[in-house]
Amino acid sequence: MTDEPLLRVSALSKFYGSRVGCENVSIDLWPGEVLAVVGESGSGKTTLLNCLSTRLLPSSGTASYRMRDGQWRELYRMSEAERRFLMRTDWGFVHQNPADGLRMAVSAGANVGERLMAVGDRHYGRIRATAVDWLSRVEIDEDRIDDEPRAFSGGMRQRLQIARNLVTGPRLVFMDEPTGGLDVSVQARLLDLLRGLVTDLGLAAIVVTHDLAVARLLSQRMMVMKDGRVVESGLTDRVLDDPRAPYTQLLVSSILQV
Amino acid sequence: MATPLVVSDVAKSFTMHLRDGVTLPVVTGVSFSIRAGECAVLGGPSGAGKSSILKMLYGNYAVDEGQIIVQHGGGLIDLASANPRTVLAVRRQTIGYVSQFLRTVPRVSALDVVAEPLVERGEDRESARAKARSLLAQLNLPEKLWALPPATFSGGEQQRVNIARGFITDHPILLLDEPTASLDAKNRDVVVELIAAKKAAGVALLGIFHDLDVRDAVADRVIDVTAFAAGKIAA
């Protein structure tokens, strides 16, 4: 583990006209660290995620990222092409709805292989072998490689989306409600898979979720947002077991016990 | 050798914002230290704040006041004010914790649950599993359970997985929250042996034991938590 963060975010704000998307958010994220951003709908967590992943430009604030060569780059000063390249290689983005992150009309294998081609791989046999390997890592049978994701169940699509994102060996992955909209049993399997992959690959991740159980299982650190602001942050188990802010206490006390 | 754990003037209260901001004081003026090779036991009735103290020492509860000085990585660290990353490093390298209940993860086998703390510290997975096997055998967990996720195990079986997970590393400080609560006599004796081995290895142990036989067998000293009582509920 290095002593330098991977991502440094300082006083980030995004306003939509006079409405606050997120306000004055600062984050240091280290390699291998999973940060959960929790809060209810409209709390600004997705706006924050979109700003961090440069899908949206913030109104103010800075974010810098330590590139593979060790150089720090300011994200919002990079060119559009540079940002896109980063997004295709060193970053991943797992959408809540797999259809937003997959190409639904091309085969599963091509969905995974496409990312490899984007980083310059041109050897068909090798691309296919890597695709097969990644499909098995996300527990999709090899004989489904030529099927289109349209023919997949929701859980399988989500696993395919994860394979597509991880195949290039990214160091940072953004996830927006990765288990949202899935059955509970499918969710558990996906969470377990994500947890294993994140640990094995030493990924850093920022996971937006409204599900505190997902946050507890996946993340070491947690940030609670309300009305665009961070109301509490700290170790995940500390925030959940000893919530300090009124809003966090409300969230934690609202969990249904089974 | 420096004292591995020194707690001084620690105070803790809960503010219940959903109950009109009522403050529940838990403990105040908590001060003690634990030497290497010693097992101290927190004593006092239920609700005196024993578990809260352990949780503060593990960074699981926030600390309102005071210091928790831990010898970590060749230096001293105040856990009460440490940032999350430091707390995680302390948990990985310095402070182990056996909780009352096992928090299971779906689909992870008992063997891997036990081996995980070693793997996190960079040990090879196979050698970590070998150590996990020998500990689970020592704790008499039937071998046919090792490959199964512990979610469906009985209370006593889960507890033994939990104990194995806590004892597998060589953390210099080990916190024990009623590790023998749901064990039979035979397995209680195994835990007493495991604790004796940790003491011999120079580990500083702090525990909560309601079972008086176990407590008498392991405790070098009892720290009376009622001395740190924070008074009655303030409205």
Image (spheres, coloured by chain):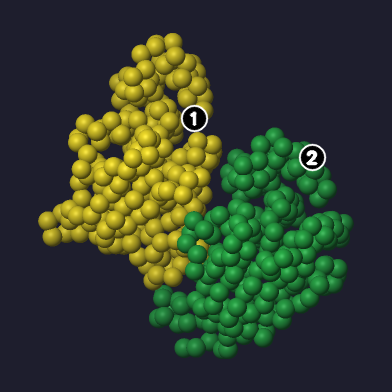
**Residue hosting label 2:** B143
Residue drawn at point x = 49 percent, y = 56 percent: B85
Residue A35 visible = yes
Q: Quadrant of residue B195?
A: bottom right
Q: Is residue A18 above or below residue B229?
A: above
Distance (Cα) linking label 1 and label 2: 29 Å
Chain identity of mark 2: B
Residue drawn at point x = 12 percent, y = 56 percent: A17
For the residues bearing labels 1 and 2, Cβ distance under 8 angstroms: no
Give the letter of the yellow chain. A
Dot 2, how many residues are within 10 Å of its Cα: few (below 14), some (14-19), or many (20+)?
A: few
Q: Is residue A58 above or below residue A187?
A: below
Residue drawn at point x = 30 percent, y = 47 percent: A64
Residue B98 visible = no
Check disc 1 and give the amino acid type: Val
- Report x, y in % for residue B225: 68, 80
**Residue hosting label 1:** A138
Which element is circle 2 on? helix
Relative depth, front residue between A175 and A189? A175
- Report x, y in % for residue A102: 33, 28
Give the letter of the green chain. B
Badges 1 and 2, same chain: no
Q: Is residue A252 above or below residue A81?
A: below
- Report x, y in % for residue B7: 62, 74
Residue drawn at point x = 62 percent, y = 59 percent: B74
- Report x, y in % for residue A157: 40, 30
